[in-house]
Image (cartoon, coloured by chain):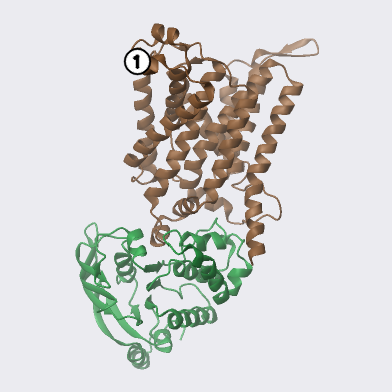
Chain colours: A brown, B green
Amino acid sequence: MSNQHQAARIRAWSTPIILALALLAFVVLTTALGDKSMARMAAQTLIRVTFVVGLWIFVGNSGVVSFGHAGFMAIGAYASAWLTLKPQTKALFLPDLWPWLAQAEWPVLPAAIAGGFLAATVALISGAAILRLSGIAASIATFAFLAIVNTIYSNWEGVTGATSSVVGLARYADQWVTLGWAVAAIFVAAFYANSASGLALRATREDEVAARASGVSMYRHRVLAMTISGFFTGVSGALLGHSLGVLNPGSFYLGITFITLAMLVVGGIGSLSGAVTGVVALSLLIEALVRMERGIEIGTTEFALPSGAQEILIGVVMILVLIIRPGGLTGGREFQLGRRRAEPKQQTATNRGVTT
Amino acid sequence: MAKLGVFDVSVRYGKVPALNDVSLHLNEGERMFISGPNGAGKSSLLRAISGAVATSHGRIEMDGTILTGRPPEAIARQGLSMVPEGREIFGSMTVEENLRVGTGIRRDRSAIESDIAEIYDAFPILGQRRNASAGALSGGQQQMLAIGRALMTNPKLMMVDEPSLGLAPNIVDQVYDTLVALQQERGLTLLIVEQSSARAARVGGRMVLLRGGAIVDQGDAREFAEKDLLKDAYFGGAKTEDA
C-alpha cells in the first residue's frame, strides 16, 4: 500500500524535474547554437516562465482567472530598481524617494527577493480584500487592481519616474540567472500543488459546495495561493527590469497580461506542465514571427511578413488551440515518469474548472 | 440532548419558499430518512443544516452548539459531514486526492493514513483505483468515494442526499449495507434522503415525509412502507421505485 503511495509521490515529483531539465536543455541549446539575440530571447522566455508559473500557482489551482498579476510584476520591478540603482541616478530621476531608499545600494539577489516580498505583501492585502468574491467577480476585481497599480506607477513622478522610463538598471538577468528563478518557481509551484492547501484549493475549483462541505476554507487557501503567486510574479518583474535595463509602467499593463494569459491557456491551464509548455511554445513562435517580419532571404528573394502579422497570428494560434484542444496543448496533464493516469473526463473537468 | 435539533427552520430562494418552519430532532446514533416528492424541500433542508444555504428563519443546533449562520467549512469542523446529491466528487483529481481533501481540517495527522486504509478496507474497489482519476469511476464507485470522502473528516453526524439516485438496485443495496456497517462501527448519526419507503423500511429507521416545504407525516419507516403498499393496492398506482 505504502509502495503505491510512494510511487505516486515519485510520479508527482518527476514533473518539476522533467520541466527543469527541459528548460536547462533549452538554455544550453540556445546559448550554444545562437547569437546574442538568441540568448536574450532565452532570458525573456525564462522571465515569462517565472511569471506564468507564478500566475499558475493561483489561477491553475483556484480556477479564478487573474488579470492583476502584471501589477505584482510592476511592484517587484520597481522595488528592485529602487534598491539597486546608484544613489546619484536616483537623486536625478527619482527625487522623491524616501531617504533610506534613495541611499540604498543593495546587491541584485536580495533586491529581487525584496521585490518578490513586496509584491507578495500587496498580493496578500489585495487578495484578502477581493478573494471572497465569486469567480467572475473576483476576476473583474483583479483587473481593477491592475488599473490601480498602473495609474499609481504612471503618475507618481518623483518615485516611479511616471511614464518616462527609469534607466540604468544593472543588466544581470541573463539566461542562466533567469533559468535559476524559473526552476525555483517550478519547484515551489509543484510543492504547493501537492500540499494540503493546493489539494484543497483544487477541490474548490472542481466543486465549491462539496469542498466547503468537506471543511475546506476556500478563502484562506485562495489568499495563500495568491501570496505565493505574487512573490514569483514580483520576482519576474525584477528580472525583466534587470534584463532590459529600462523600466516603464506600460510594460506591465495590458500587453503582458494578455500574452501571458494566452500562454497559460495555450499550454493548458490545468497543469504546471501546461504553463511552462505554453510559454516556451508561444515565445518561440513570437521569435520566429518577429524574425519573419524583419525579413528572411530564401534563395535570392527576400520574404517578409507585414508588420503586425505577429500579433494577428498569435491570436489565430490561440483560437485554433482552443478549438482543437480546449484543454490546451497538454490537455491539463502533467509530464510524469511512469504510467499515466486515465483521464477520460479531463476536458470537461478543465473547462468546468475555469470560471471565466 | 439531541444530536441535531432543527427548530422552525425556513429557507427561501429569493421570494420562493423552499422550507416552511420545519422542526426535527435526531438522537445520537439514530438513523432518519427524509422522503417526499421532488421539490418538497429535502435537499434544501440538508443544505440549510450544512450551511450551504442561509436560513431565513429558525435555528439549527448540533450538540447544543448553534450552527445557523456559520459557513459550511466551520460546520464541517464541528463534525457534520454531507454527501451531496449527484455524487459531487472532484472529477479531475485522483481517488486518493479526493479522500485527502477532507483531512485538511484534522489535527490528528497520524490517524489520517490509518483512516485512509480503513476506507480502502470498507471499499476495496477504491483501494484498487486509488491513483485513477475519480471522474473515471462508475456511478456506484463515485457514490462510495463521496461517502469515503465525507468519512475522512471524521464526522459524528453524516447526511447523505439520495444515495440511490441513478444507481442499480444491487449497488444501492451495497451502499446501504456499507452505511449501516459504518454507522455501527463508528456510532454515526445518519440523516438520509430516500424516496423509496420500501427501501427505508428494509434498512430501518425513522422517517419524515416532506411536502411543499413542510413536514406532513413522520414515524417508523415500516409504517410508511405499509401505507404506500396499501395505496398501491387501492389505487393501482405506480410501484414504489425499486421495491
Number of marks in the image?
1
The percent coordinates of residue A79 (x first, y second) are: 43, 23
Q: Residue at x 38, y 54 (%)?
A: A217
- Residue nearer the viewer, B10 or B17: B10
Mark 1 surroundings within 10 Å by alpha-carbon count, few (fewer than 14), some (14 through 19), many (20 or more): few
Horizontal relation, residue A18 to residue B237: left or right? right
Q: Is residue A323 visible?
A: no
Name the quarter where the N terminus of chain A is drawn: bottom right
Q: Quadrant of residue B118?
A: bottom right
Give the answer, above or below, for where A9 lies relative to A133: below
Residue type for callout 1: Pro
The percent coordinates of residue A57 (x first, y second) are: 50, 42
- Please tell me whether mark 1 sits on a helix, a strand or a loop: helix
Horizontal relation, residue B21 to residue A47: left or right? left
Q: Quadrant of residue A289?
A: top right
Q: Is residue B241 visible?
A: yes
Q: Residue at x 66, y 47 (%)?
A: A14
Q: Residue at x 42, y 48 (%)?
A: A221
Give the answer, above or below, for where A295 lies relative to B103: above
The percent coordinates of residue A338 (x first, y second) are: 71, 54
Give the answer, above or below, for where B46 lies relative to A154: below
Horizontal relation, residue A277 to residue B105: left or right? right
- Residue nearer the viewer, B203 or B229: B203
The percent coordinates of residue B60 (x first, y second) are: 24, 69
| Residue identifier under label 1 | A99
Q: Quadrant of residue A340?
A: bottom right
